[in-house]
Image (cartoon, rainbow, N blue to C red):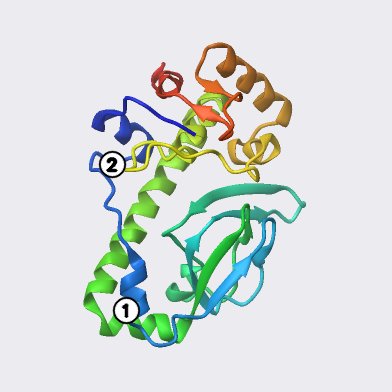
Amino acid sequence: MQVKGITAQKKSTLNGAGKKRQVVDWEPLLAGIAGVNTVLEYGANRKIFSQGQPADSVFYLRQGKVKLSVISQQGKEAIVAVLGAGEFLGEGCLAGQPLRIATATTTTESILARIEKPLMTRMLHEHHEISELFVTHLLSRNIRYEADLVDQLFNSSEKRLARILLLLSHFGKESRTEAIVPGINQGSLAQMVGTTRSRVSHFMNKFKKLGFIDYSSDDGLTVNSGLLSVVLHD
C-alpha cells in the first residue's frame, strides 16, 4: 500500500498527536535479557491466545500482523486493533488483568517472542531504559485507541473506513509503502468499521472511482494520500 505527500499536520488527524511517532528497535534491547528468546512461529489465521484464557504473558511481534478481536455475549465479533511488527500484545496482564479480554489472531505468517509475566515485570523494574520506552509505547497505543473511540462515536462509516485504510497503510510513519495484507479483507474491514460488508464494498468502489485506492498493483491494494480528504471533509 502506498501513501504519498504526507504532512505533519495531517498525521495528527489520524493518530491524535502532532509529533512523529518514535520508532524503537526492540530487538537489541530484548536480545540481552535472559528468557526472552522464546520464539513462536505462526501461520496465517492462527490464534495466539483467546478471549477468556489466563493472562500470564506478554508477546512481542517480531514479524507479521496480528488482529485483536472481541466477542460479545450475543456472539457478535468486532476487530478492535491490527498490530504490526515492533508492537506488543497481551500487556494487560501487567496491570493485574487475570483473563484475556480479546482474542489475538495472526493475519499473515508471524514470528513472536513470548515473555512470561514475572520476567516482564522484573525486566521493567531492573532495566530503566526498557521501562521508559515501554511506557512511551503504551501511551502511544492509548492515544491511538482514544482516536479510534472518537472516530467511532462521531464519524460516519465512510470516514471510519477511510481512516482505517490510511492507518493500515502506515500513514504518517517512516515507511510509506506497504501492501495491505491478504487477511484484511472486506469482511474484516466491516468488523473494524462497525458496519456491514455491503457498505464497505460500496465505499471501496467509490474510493476506487475517485482514484483514492487501486487494486491493480501486484503488491495489493494501494492507498493514495488523497483519501485523507474523506477524513478531513466536514
Q: Earlier in the sequence, mark 2 or mark 1?
A: 2
Who is closer to the viewer here, 114 or 139?
Answer: 114
Image position, residue 87 (x, y; %): 43, 60
Who is closer to the viewer here, 154 or 58?
Answer: 58
Image position, residue 3 (x, y; %): 41, 30
Q: Does any portion of residue 215 appear in the rendered image?
A: yes
Please count the marks in the image. Answer: 2
Image position, residue 127 (x, y; %): 26, 80
Q: Which residue is mark 1?
A: 124
Q: Which residue is mark 2?
A: 17
Residue occupying the point 28% across, 73% down: 130
Q: Does any portion of residue 51 appear in the rendered image?
A: no
Residue 137 sits in quarter: bottom left
Q: Secondary structure at mark 2?
A: loop
Image position, residue 120 (x, y; %): 40, 80
User: How many other residues sit within 10 Å of disc 1, few (<14), some (14-19) or many (≥20)?
Assistant: some
- Inspect the image, locate mark 2, and give the three-letter code of the amino acid beneath it: Ala
Residue occupying the point 34% across, 37% down: 172
Q: Secondary structure at mark 1?
A: helix
Q: Residue furthest top?
A: 210
